[in-house]
Amino acid sequence: MEIRLLLSTLVSLFVVADPLGVSSVFTVLTKDVPQKEQRRIAVRAATTAAVLLILFIFAGQALLNYMHVSLPAFRIAGGLLLFITAFRMIMGFHDPDQLRSKKSAYPDHSNIAIFPLAIPLLAGPGVMTVALFFWTDAKTIPEYTIVISSIIIIQAVAFLCMWGASRLGRIFGPSGIGIIARVMGVLLAAMAVQFISDGIKNLMQL
């Protein structure tokens, strides 16, 4: 049971966080930054994202209770957010050409470790939603530990992808990374529909 939960959590977080896609964003945003500074930015981005996600899953349930929001309602809203994220991945809103554009959503590169790398890419609404889904479904200490460990593992993978972004770029190329991001977007869209479906079913049973 724990192994299945671990695999499910890791795959879900990997799909929505999209470390390979983030690495291509990282390459564009740090192309004029010294290598030592690139490593510092990657470490800070991954660490910030992990801390934010862990804080969110601890406080998220209490926040929902305080706002009188049921878990089924949150699943529906989270599913909609995930679908928007999936749509952006499929349409290539984080492609290098988009980021180089003067109309880019990230014109300020002065603190890129926090924005956009940590938020909204590595710890955006979609990632927070998935993490909270698994956290609220957990019932035992080993299951809670698995969720936290999965968050840390995925952010460590994200760091490695950013640190090795140039190598990944040579292996997959811009087209390869774009294709992978779009396939993950399709998978994420399917996950989003499933979350919405489960939320509606549970809401009708209340």
Image (cartoon, grey):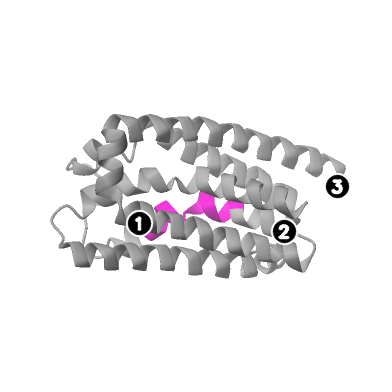
Residue to which mark 3 is pinned: 206
Amino acid type, label 1 = Leu
Please report the residue visible at 31 percent of the width from the left and 43 percent of the height from the top.
168
Please report the residue visible at 49 percent of the width from the left and 69 percent of the height from the top.
51
User: Which of the 4 image quarters holds residue 66?
Assistant: bottom right
Q: Is residue 108 above or below residue 20?
A: below
Asked if the magenta segment contains residue 45, the reply would be no
Q: Earlier in the sequence, mark 3 or mark 2?
A: 2
Asked if the magenta segment contains residue 127, the reply would be yes
Please report the residue visible at 60 percent of the width from the left and 37 percent of the height from the top.
192
Amino acid type, label 3 = Leu
Q: Which residues are magenta?
A: 117-130
Q: Is residue 203 above or below residue 91?
A: below
- Find residue 117 and name its label: 1
Tell me the crowding category of disc 2: few under 14, some 14 to 19, or many 20 or more residues within 10 angstroms, Cα based. some
* Residue with the most extreme right position: 205
